[in-house]
Image (cartoon, rainbow, N blue to C red):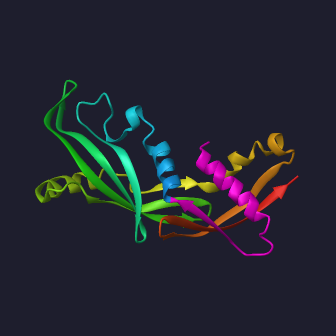
Amino acid sequence: MTTFWRAIAAALLLTMGRVQLCSAVEMKVSREALERTLKQQLFSGPDGRYFVKGNAQSGCYTYAEDAKLSFVQDRIVVRLKTHSRLGKSMRGTCLGVALSVPAEVSLAPDAEGETIGFRDARVDRVSDQKELNFLLSPFLSHQIPSSLKVNAADLLRKALEGSTASSGYKVTLDRLKIHSIQIQGDTMVVDVDGDISVK
């Protein structure tokens, strides 16, 4: 489990003890923490690459690397470098063209029940050349995941599994409900409530 999710579990533990005093807890996730999580979950392949199409052994492929995350208005923007060999695979090689261009993908944060997700993934920019954008944007738009989801309650429960050994108390998350996710400046604000038991 990543340090990011352990930190979230600790923050929830500290604030959930006060749930009787307030109806919801506001959890703030920094841009840096979200970028680390993105890299750990998507860019964990060989050489920190995320293959959109094909793999390292494919003749034709498209992969992204060197992701940099920022918040722009109500969207999460990921700037990355894309490398492609586009064409027809024949006997382990790609008959076509090789391209390496910067790209920009944006996602909208989303919440439903116990799930933190990202929806409405779209390619905002493929390169600085309009002609190349015109050719590549439709192709890449169909290759990026349409939605990404993480069950936050499951991750928090896993983080709490070792609570007895580390604290002497058995701490369990009984219920978690995410009400909303908003971007405020350089922070993603998650509004949650839930129930935690300590034995």
- Between 129 and 172, the residue placed more toward the observer is 129
Q: Residue at x 31, y 37 (%)?
A: 54
Q: Is residue 6 above or below residue 24?
A: above
| The stretch drawn in magenta includes residue 13 | yes
Residue 177, compared with residue 93, is above or below; it is: below
Would you say 59 lies left or right of 116 here?
left
> Does residue 155 appear in the picture of this structure?
no
Q: Is residue 39 left or right of residue 49?
A: right
Residue sitting at the far left: 131
Residue at the far top: name it. 91
The N terminus, quarter of image: top right
Q: Is residue 99 above or below residue 148?
A: above
Residue at figure coordinates x 22%, y 56% from the top left:
137
Answer left or right for 4 relative to 97: right
Outermost residue, bottom side: 22
Image: magenta residue range: 1-30
Horizontal and vertical percent position of residue 159: 69, 47
The residue located at (27%, 53%) in the rendering is: 103
Q: Quadrant of residue 166?
A: top right
Question: Residue 52, position in %: x, y?
Answer: 33, 44
- Can residue 168 be seen by looking at this rendering? yes
- How many numbered discs? 0
What's the residue at 19%, 52% (across, down)?
A: 136
Residue 141 in which image quadrant? bottom left
102 vs 1, left or right, is: left
- Residue 84 sits in quarter: top left
Instruction: Please state the horizontal and vertical placement of residue 174, each as a whole percent of the image.
Output: 76, 58
The location of residue 15, given as percent across then percent down, is 73, 64
Residue 166 shown in magenta = no
